[in-house]
Image (spheres, rainbow, N blue to C red):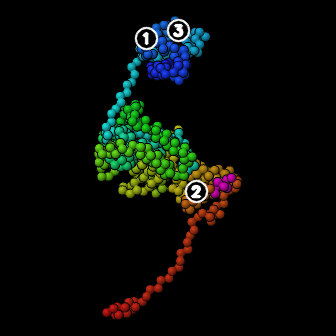
């Protein structure tokens, strides 16, 4: 082909073919011109054996500026790129240097760096025998475009992989990186694998802590976790992802496999989070089936697991305020009002948090997520506040957490319609009644659908009619009369028995 150099292999094949056919036919079959064929037949050596050309075919366009202007710039700042230098030349010399000189300059800069540039980082390929090394890492998967329950689902994947066989385990993680997510994912992986390798490596875990005290505590807990399973804990240096290369390369293949599975599925929507977790598990299982032989070999040299799992939660304490809220890990939670003034121990799992007073769990809820671009998040459950709001519905109008109270968009839009159409007191009373009905009747979703229909019809809800439809029905208590037998009847039975 024009512009491509003829290789030694092409020359050998051409000469072999030339013995059987004419020069024109042999050249056509090899995809070269007849002129090149004549040049091959006249040459006595292969292309790789020819001496390098020592003359120029055109005048050097950089003569006069390379040594005088460009080399001093490169010596002062070796990181300057060819395009930057080219734009500087055009700035200094106007139209003397056309766009066709750019590629020549880039090749000249690359050759200069090979001779005078700084030393580059060298990567050392590692030999990992069976059972020696396992690696863990998190990866952001927002680009997959997964939708759960009708809403975009930003998430991460935790992945565990064996360096030798490539066996992997992956789990969906809501929110950011945390020690709880690492501990749960690692333990699930080890128990699914049925053994533990010698060493476990992860990244610097810098995304899991906010300050030096948290870093020290997390480091200690990570080492304790690995010690429980007989693992030698190690972490790569911050910012040096290539030190964790055996897992970094697998993150891309895993996300690509999930993306292909979603394409084959035809859509990316899931009714429940459990459905998406099942989809990811199936993808990982298919990838593991390809390496069954190496996995079986590696399982024979893994260390035995301990008798039981260890804790996989973070623990902190926080005081419940008079507003019936508590701040845990940058998330403001609402809690039952009976806990106001207490300082429970909070156990923070990847998917939930628990509040403990002594050895009693007094509260449990889904773990909140900090929205993208925000410093803090809120997880307000209207059910915790209904006993007080029923007594003081007017507090809803200017409550600072009002917009976070509504469980679904239909409730928020209904409030906006009510406050626009009704007096404030009446709007508050009706909105609190709707929320109370959703809590008492366990009909949050069904009531939201009705409210959505009313919004489209531009009609205000009638609480009495909705109460008849959704409120739990009171079963009448039967009137039962109990007649006790006389004691004389028991005496008669005893006489008969005697």
Asked if 248 appears above or below 151 in the picture, the reply is above
Residues at discs 3 and 2 in contact (Cβ within 8 Å): no
Q: Please, what is the dominant secondary structure of the magenta stretch?
A: helix
Q: Tag 2 or tag 1, which sits nearer the N-term?
A: 1
Q: Tag 1 or tag 3, which sits nearer the N-term?
A: 1
Q: Residues within 10 Å of mark 1 (few under 14, many from 20)?
A: few
Residue lying at 36% horizontally and 38% vertically, measured from the top left = 163
- Distance from disc 3 to disc 1, alpha carbons, whole Å, reads 16 Å
Residue denoted by label 2: 445
Which residues lie in the magenta part? 450-456
Asked if 23 appears above or below 422 in the picture, the reply is above
Residue 445 x, y percent position in the rendering: 58, 56
- Distance from disc 3 to disc 2, alpha carbons, whole Å, reads 78 Å
Which label lies toward us, 3 or 1?
1
Residue lying at 57% horizontally and 49% vertically, measured from the top left = 150
Residues at discs 1 and 2 in contact (Cβ within 8 Å): no
**Residue sitting nearer the eye, 385 or 148:** 148
Residue 330 x, y percent position in the rendering: 47, 43
SS state under label 1? loop
Name the quarter where the C terminus is drawn. bottom left
Question: For residue 451: magenta?
Answer: yes
Question: For residue 99: magenta?
Answer: no
Left or right position of 331 against 164: right
The residue at the far front in this view is 20
Residue 438 image-quadrant placement: bottom right
SS state under label 2? helix
- Give residue 51's mark: 1
Asked if 260 appears above or below 74 in the picture, the reply is below
Residue 91 image-quadrant placement: top right
Residue 392 x, y percent position in the rendering: 57, 57
Residue 223 x, y percent position in the rendering: 32, 41
Residue denoted by label 3: 57
């Amino acid at each position: 082909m024009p512009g491509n150099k003829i290789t030694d292999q092409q020359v050998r094949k051409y000469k072999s073919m030339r013995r059987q056919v004419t020069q024109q036919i042999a050249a056509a079959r090899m995809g070269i011109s007849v002129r090149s064929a004549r040049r091959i037949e006249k040459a006595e050596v292969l292309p790789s054996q020819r001496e390098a050309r020592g003359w120029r075919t055109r005048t050097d366009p950089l003569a006069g500026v390379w040594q005088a202007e460009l080399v001093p710039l490169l010596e002062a700042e070796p990181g300057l790129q060819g395009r930057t230098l080219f734009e500087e030349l055009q700035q200094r010399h106007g139209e003397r240097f056309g766009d066709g000189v750019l590629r020549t300059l880039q090749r000249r800069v690359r050759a200069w760096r090979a001779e005078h540039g700084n030393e580059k980082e060298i990567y050392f390929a590692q030999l990992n025998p069976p059972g020696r090394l396992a690696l863990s890492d998190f990866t952001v998967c927002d680009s997959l475009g997964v939708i759960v329950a009708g809403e975009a689902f930003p998430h991460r994947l935790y992945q565990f992989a064996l360096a030798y066989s490539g066996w992997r385990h992956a789990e969906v993680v809501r929110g950011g990186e945390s020690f709880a997510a690492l501990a749960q994912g690692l333990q699930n992986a080890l128990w699914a694998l049925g053994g533990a390798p010698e060493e476990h490596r992860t990244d610097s875990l810098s995304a899991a802590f906010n300050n030096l005290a948290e870093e020290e505590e997390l480091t200690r807990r990570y080492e304790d976790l690995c010690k429980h399973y007989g693992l030698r804990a190690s972490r790569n240096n911050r910012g040096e992802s290539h030190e964790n290369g055996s897992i970094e390369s697998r993150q891309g293949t895993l996300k690509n496999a999930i993306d292909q599975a979603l394409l084959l599925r035809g859509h990316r929507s899931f009714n429940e989070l459990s459905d998406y977790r099942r989809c990811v598990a199936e993808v990982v299982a298919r990838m593991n089936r390809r390496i069954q032989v190496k996995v079986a070999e590696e399982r024979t040299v893994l260390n035995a697991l301990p008798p039981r799992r260890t804790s996989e939660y973070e623990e902190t304490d926080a005081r419940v305020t008079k507003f019936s809220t508590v701040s845990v890990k940058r998330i403001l939670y609402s809690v039952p009002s009976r806990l106001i003034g207490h300082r429970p121990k909070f156990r923070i799992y990847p998917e939930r948090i628990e509040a403990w007073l002594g050895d009693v769990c007094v509260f449990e809820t889904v773990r909140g997520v900090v929205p993208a671009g925000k410093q803090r998040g809120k997880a307000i459950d209207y059910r915790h506040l209904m006993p007080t709001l029923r007594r003081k519905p007017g507090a809803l109008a200017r409550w600072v957490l009002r917009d976070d109270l509504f469980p679904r968009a239909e409730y928020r839009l209904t409030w906006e319609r009510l406050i626009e159409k009704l007096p404030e007191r009446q709007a508050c009373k009706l909105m609190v009644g709707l929320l109370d009905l959703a809590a008492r009747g366990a009909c949050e979703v069904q009531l939201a659908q009705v409210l959505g229909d009313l919004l489209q019809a531009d009609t205000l809800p009638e609480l009495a009619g909705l109460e008849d439809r959704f409120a739990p029905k009171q079963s009448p208590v039967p009137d039962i009369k109990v007649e006790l037998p006389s004691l004389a009847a028991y005496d008669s039975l005893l006489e008969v028995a005697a």
